[in-house]
Image (cartoon, grey):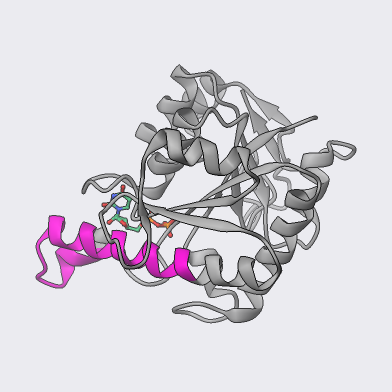
């Protein structure tokens, strides 16, 4: 398939592994090793990580916290996850840079597009923390936006399901996985892949999305190698 530069989106929830809150170190370790496999092949890797394992803005509304305040709390949660990933990647010998949508000089660089591109060219894994730095957005939108900004070839959306199905595979045994879909087909059929803001950003800027199971060891590498059909490609 020959992807040169990819943007990998990991949800915060995925980091929980078998726990129901926080960061599971075994899960983190698996992700780092899988990322290393593609990084070693020379693929330039940018990562956006969610924060749902720690805090989500929508939670705020039910707990008496102001929505915008809650969104900032969610963004800070993504920085915690990003720092955890950064540390684990470095433990496995990769050079990394953490760039944040909110200024936090003590722990990360501010996001500067040209700098991010330069880091990628130099083979550093770039992690984008704190979303885009604005409330009312998600880390999926961050993934789409940053992918466009750094001119990534594709957004790889790592989930716990191995692609987009005709129905919910956990409920319907006859559900079939799509290998490919167009952006229009996804919208027409209401398949839930990302929020609309995130999705249309990719559509309008011709950035393909691949939804795949990141929890299966080696899947990321297979996807990048392109010998085997992995996940669902939306283009
Ligand atoms: N968030 C935000 N702006 C952004 C990115 C994230 O306000 O640009 C907040 C939002 O409240 C969101 C939370 O951060 O609920 C955590 O991100 P997200 O829910 O996307 O994480 P995931 O579902 O991928 O774990």
Residue 152 vs residue 99, the one in the foreground: 99
Q: Is residue 9 left or right of residue 29?
A: left
Tell me where residue 64 sits by quadrant: bottom left
Q: Is residue 138 left or right of residue 7?
A: left
In the rendered image, residue 100, in percent from the top left (x then y), is placed at 35, 53
Residue 9 magenta: no
Q: Which residues are magenta?
A: 59-83
Query: At x 66% / y 79%, what residue is drawn?
Result: 26
Q: Nearer the viewer, residue 58 or 148?
A: 148
Query: With respect to residue 41, does 87 lie above or below?
Result: below
148 relative to 131 in the view: left or right? right
Quarter of the picture containing the C terminus is: top right
Question: Does residue 113 sit above or below 84 in this rendering?
Answer: above
- Specify whether residue 58 is in view: yes
Q: Position of residue 103 (x, y in %)?
A: 25, 55
Quick check: which quadrant has ligand 1?
A: bottom left
x%, y% of residue 156?
A: 61, 42
Q: Residue placed at 60% from the left, 27% from the top?
A: 208
User: Which of the 4 quarters of the picture holds residue 81?
Assistant: bottom left
Tell me if residue 164 can be seen: no
């Amino acid at each position: 398939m020959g992807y040169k530069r990819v943007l990998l989106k990991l949800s915060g929830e995925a980091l929980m592994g078998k726990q129901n809150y926080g960061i599971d170190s075994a899960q983190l370790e698996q992700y780092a090793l899988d990322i290393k496999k593609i990084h070693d092949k020379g693929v330039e890797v940018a990562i956006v990580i969610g924060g749902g394992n720690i805090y989500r803005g929508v939670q705020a509304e039910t707990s008496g916290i102001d929505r915008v305040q809650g969104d900032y709390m969610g963004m800070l949660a993504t920085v915690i996850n990003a720092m955890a990933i950064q540390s684990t990647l470095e433990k496995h010998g990769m050079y990394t840079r953490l760039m944040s949508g909110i200024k936090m000089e003590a722990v990360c660089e501010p996001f500067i597009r040209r700098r991010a591109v330069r880091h990628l060219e130099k083979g550093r894994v770039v992690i984008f923390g704190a979303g885009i730095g604005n409330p009312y957005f998600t880390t999926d939108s961050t993934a789409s936006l940053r992918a466009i900004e750094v001119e990534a070839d594709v957004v790889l959306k790592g989930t716990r399901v191995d692609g987009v199905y005709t129905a919910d595979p956990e409920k319907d045994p006859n559900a079939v996985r799509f290998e490919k879909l167009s952006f229009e087909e996804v919208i027409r059929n209401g398949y839930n892949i990302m929020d609309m803001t995130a999705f249309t950003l990719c559509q309008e800027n011709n950035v393909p999305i691949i939804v795949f199971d990141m929890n299966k060891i080696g899947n990321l590498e297979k996807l990048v190698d392109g010998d085997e059909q992995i996940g669902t490609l939306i283009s």
